[in-house]
Image (spheres, coloured by chain):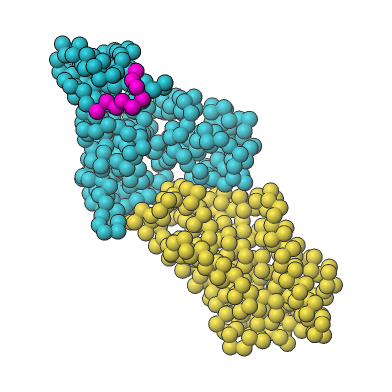
Chain colours: A yellow, B cyan
Amino acid sequence: MNKEYIIRNLKAILGRAYPRVIAANREYSWIIADIILPLLSVIAYGTLYKFLGASKDFLGFAVLGGAMSAFWLNVLWDMASQLYWEKMSGNLQLYILSPISLVSILLGMSIGGMLATSLRAAATLIVGTFIFKLDFSLINITQLLLVFFLTLAALYGLGMMLASLYLIWGREAWHLSEFFQEPVYLVSGMYFPVKFLGKVGFFSSLIPLTVGLDGLRQLLFKEGATFGFLSVNIEILILIILTVIYALLAIYYLKKMEYLARKEGKLTIRWE
Amino acid sequence: MDDSISIKTENLGRIYKKEGGVLEALKNININVNRGEIFGLLGPNGAGKTTLIKILTTLLLPSSGKAYVLGYDVETETLKIREKINMVSGGEWAGYGILTVRENLWMFSQFYGIPTKKAKREIDKYLEIFGLEEDANTKISKLSTGMRQKMNIIRGILSNPEVLFLDEPTLGLDVQIARTVRSFIKVWMKEKEGRTILLTTHYLNEADELCNRIAIIDNGEIHALDTPQGLKKILKNKIMYSVELERESYLNLKELPYTTKFTVNPLKDGKIEVKFQIQDENKIVDIFNYLKNNGFNLVSFRKREPTLEDVFIEIVGKEFKEDE
């Protein structure tokens, strides 16, 4: 791999991230989809917690879940399904034709998606904090940043892997996004501590959001550790393992997808 | 591989698996495309043109045989080929509607590692050439088909490819824009020595105007390969006529005695144009009489030079239909 190739791929990452970031400034429908709708769920859970007399930190758990749900929606709808849409628009064949790795394209999508979604997640968090007058207790900022960025890395690694798989499986796979969306809210403990799910939590730890959210709650709220599923260090370890596994699988399936595209001639032709 | 050759195929074949069998899209294709030439692949839809382009641009693997671009094997040396080529297809809707023309072009330039400053300079240069400078900041979702295709052509040449693949580049464009695209192709080829274009088209006039050599392809096979003039020489001993006729609407011309390769094209006002070849020029009066006796009134007639369409009919044995 020479220097020129590396620079070209870095530029490709930047190039492909650009539309994602720009879209956030030009399309304002996301304010409804990514802030107001999650906030409605947050308000519903917040009202329930208030009614049940739960501690104020539970409101914080729900607000944090609402904020992080923006990343899950972004991964599901703008990462996993994206290569399918790229195929339909004719972009996919131009990506394959370019002298770069397809991994750079997906990394560009991921980074652009993360940046744009961070803005949305932050907006939910700020509005939620204002509505419920939340109290944060910053336990360990290093661990907090580590958990947050590892959650995103593992989550977008999962998205990159699904992007190739959706394309290989065909258009029907797109319905998987609809199928996955709501159950993941439940099993990952998006609006409540996953500890309450018992052993289900071990299985749902394959979804980076589960351990990521749990870790963030433990590091941001006073009662977070009391309702923690696993220790933060173990959760960091799980997130590192998930990041590596999903990244390797993403690269593997991307290569497989390109091979199948060239062998069968179906994946890059939009009407096939 | 000889340095003067850009593209070479050796017994290249490609099959597609279909329900209940296989479709042989390409059969033993052997072509050599020279550096510096515009090489045309002329054939109807489904002839195998796009399959061949997809193999040469590394988007598709051959099922048999070999293909080389600039001396590199399309199966194993994909990166080396991709660094030096680009492709533009007709009816292409690539890019992102949310981005402007300039932003889209910049994005694609990054995939070829072009420094931003240089990319912006080149983009502005080509936008001006194509008369798109006023639309540079328009979102591409707002562009007409013609404007979008001009942008696609700019995308294809921004990376300064040694070999440019143009797959039906003027498909669906109005006459004026198609003319602009064709003029630009000629200028671009002259701008730098050694550039090669492989052009697929089912517009016969386009192939005639642009190409140094043309391969006539149908059903996955190359039927003839020569310069446009060379191909037309195949018909040098044939006498060709084009006649315009008026008729009652219910009348159809199904046969015409003394002629071969006759085709009928409907014109405006219910008129038809009939093209045919004859061996014996003395028979033309008999033909006109036959037409008159069968309800067709002669409006005009002319003896004409052979076109690539005639060559296609002569070689492939059927009429060249764009919607085939």
Q: Picture quarter containing residue A39?
A: bottom right
In the displayed structure image, the side of residue A130 where residue B79 appears, left or right: left
Residue pictured at 25% horizontal, 55% vertical: B22
B130, above or below B106, in the image: above
A64, above or below B219, in the image: below
Residue A41 position within the rendered picture, expressed as x and y whole percent measured from the top left: 73, 71
Residue pictured at 59% horizontal, 45% vertical: B97
Q: Picture quarter containing residue A215?
A: bottom right
Residue pictured at 62% horizontal, 88% vertical: A198
Residue A256 position within the rendered picture, expressed as x and y whole percent measured from the top left: 39, 62
Where the N terminus of chain A falls, by quadrant? bottom left
Magenta extent: B246-254
Residue B205 position within the rendered picture, expressed as x and y whole percent measured from the top left: 36, 25
Residue A11 position within the rendered picture, expressed as x and y whole percent measured from the top left: 55, 49
Instruction: State whether residue B227 appears in this view.
Output: no
Assess whether residue B298 is covered by the magenta stretch.
no
In the displayed structure image, the side of residue B246 where residue A86 appears, left or right: right
Query: Relative to the observer, which residue lies in front, B130 or A167?
Result: A167
Residue pictured at 33% horizontal, 45% vertical: B51
In the displayed structure image, the side of residue A272 where residue A196 appears, left or right: right
B193, above or below B118, in the image: above
Query: Relative to the observer, which residue lies in front, B76 or B323?
Result: B323
Q: Picture quarter containing residue A45?
A: bottom right
* Secondary structure mostly seen in the magenta stretch: loop
B308, above or below B286, in the image: below
Query: Relative to the observer, which residue lies in front, B22 or B93?
Result: B22
Instruction: State whether residue A20 appears in this view.
Output: yes
